[in-house]
Image (cartoon, rainbow, N blue to C red):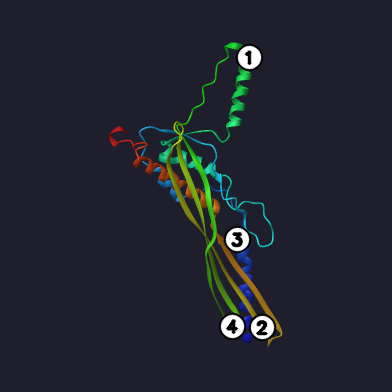
């Protein structure tokens, strides 16, 4: 009788584990994500005047590939779209009042499109065709990128087993580092240099059952687990946003720009 109750109990654990794992695989709808740093970006005091800034390239300087025990993967360990997050952070600073970002990453496409407009206008209007406005030039450039991605900085775990039933918990901590330089276009001087780091935490929780039933004639063995990995892209985005906040504050401390006074609002 006791063996039957135990077998039913263990079978219930097995079914619960299968149902739970199936639920994790549900398809989710796309969502708009933000980070806690967005609030700090948007509440920055407005400047006396906007800073025109250009971002040419802000990418992965680590060159690392995704780790694998058996295969040589070509996928990179960190995002290759860090410049997108940087431009978005610059545009959000002070609710859009801080930086006037000019397009440089897709400059070739922009120049081609402007040439098409000129040719079209000339074809229809001849020499009297209306000229395009001149492109804005930037007073400062932003250089830098993702300068570090350190894995397995801290690893550990704990587990226990009793009467064939065990549970274990494992964790791993990685770190991503971002570096940004602000450069004067007129002199080439590095006006500011900041760096930020963000830890990436991964955890795994599992349960296992190994039990003989009916005096050793039947064996029940099952395992279930759940792994949660913090997104590397999210960590990069948060580090970039923190770096932009630091640029604004340090620039004001070094008198590169000024916050708008209350009476001038």
Tell me which numbered mark, 4 or 1, is placed earlier along the sequence.
Answer: 1
Q: Which residue is mark 1?
A: 124
Q: CA distance from mark 2 to mark 4?
A: 10 Å
Q: Residue at x 48, y 28 (%)?
A: 137
Image quadrant in which the N terminus is located: bottom right
Residue 35, x across and y down, in percent:
47, 50
Tell me which numbered mark, 4 or 3, is placed earlier along the sequence.
Answer: 3
Q: Does residue 106 lie above or below 174 as drawn? A: above
Q: Which residue is mark 2?
A: 212
- Residue at the right extreme, as displayed: 217
Q: Which residue is mark 3?
A: 24
Q: Which residue is mark 4?
A: 163
Mark 2, Cα crowd under 10 Å, few <14 / some 14-19 / many 20+, is some
Tell me which numbered mark, 3 or 2, is placed earlier along the sequence.
Answer: 3
Q: CA distance from mark 3 to mark 2?
A: 30 Å
Q: CA distance from mark 4 to mark 3?
A: 29 Å
Q: Does residue 103 lie above or below 82 as drawn? A: above
């Amino acid at each position: 009788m006791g063996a039957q109750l135990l077998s039913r109990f263990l079978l219930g654990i097995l079914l619960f584990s299968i149902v739970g794992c199936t639920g994790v695989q549900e398809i989710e709808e796309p969502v708009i994500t933000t980070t806690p740093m967005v609030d700090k970006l948007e509440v920055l005091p407005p400047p006396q005047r906007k800073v025109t800034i250009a971002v040419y390239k802000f990418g992965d300087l680590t060159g690392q590939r995704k780790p694998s025990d058996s295969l040589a993967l070509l996928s990179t360990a960190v995002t290759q779209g860090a410049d997108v997050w940087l431009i978005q952070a610059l545009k959000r600073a002070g609710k859009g009042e801080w930086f006037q970002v000019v397009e440089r990453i897709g400059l070739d496409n922009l120049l081609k499109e402007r040439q098409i407009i000129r040719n079209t206008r000339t074809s229809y209007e001849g020499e009297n065709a209306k000229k395009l406005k001149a492109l804005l030039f930037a007073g400062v450039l932003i250089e830098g990128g993702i300068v570090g991605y350190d894995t397995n900085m801290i690893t550990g775990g704990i587990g226990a087993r009793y009467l064939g039933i065990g549970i274990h918990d494992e964790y791993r901590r990685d770190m991503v580092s971002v570096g940004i330089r602000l450069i004067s276009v007129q002199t080439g001087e590095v006006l500011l240099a900041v760096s930020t780091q963000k830890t990436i935490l991964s955890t795994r929780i599992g349960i296992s059952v190994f039990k003989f039933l009916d005096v050793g004639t039947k064996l029940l063995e099952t395992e279930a687990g759940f792994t949660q990995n913090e997104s590397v892209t999210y960590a990069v985005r948060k580090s970039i946003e923190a770096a932009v906040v630091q640029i604004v504050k340090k620039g004001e401390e070094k008198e590169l720009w000024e916050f708008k006074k209350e009476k001038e609002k």
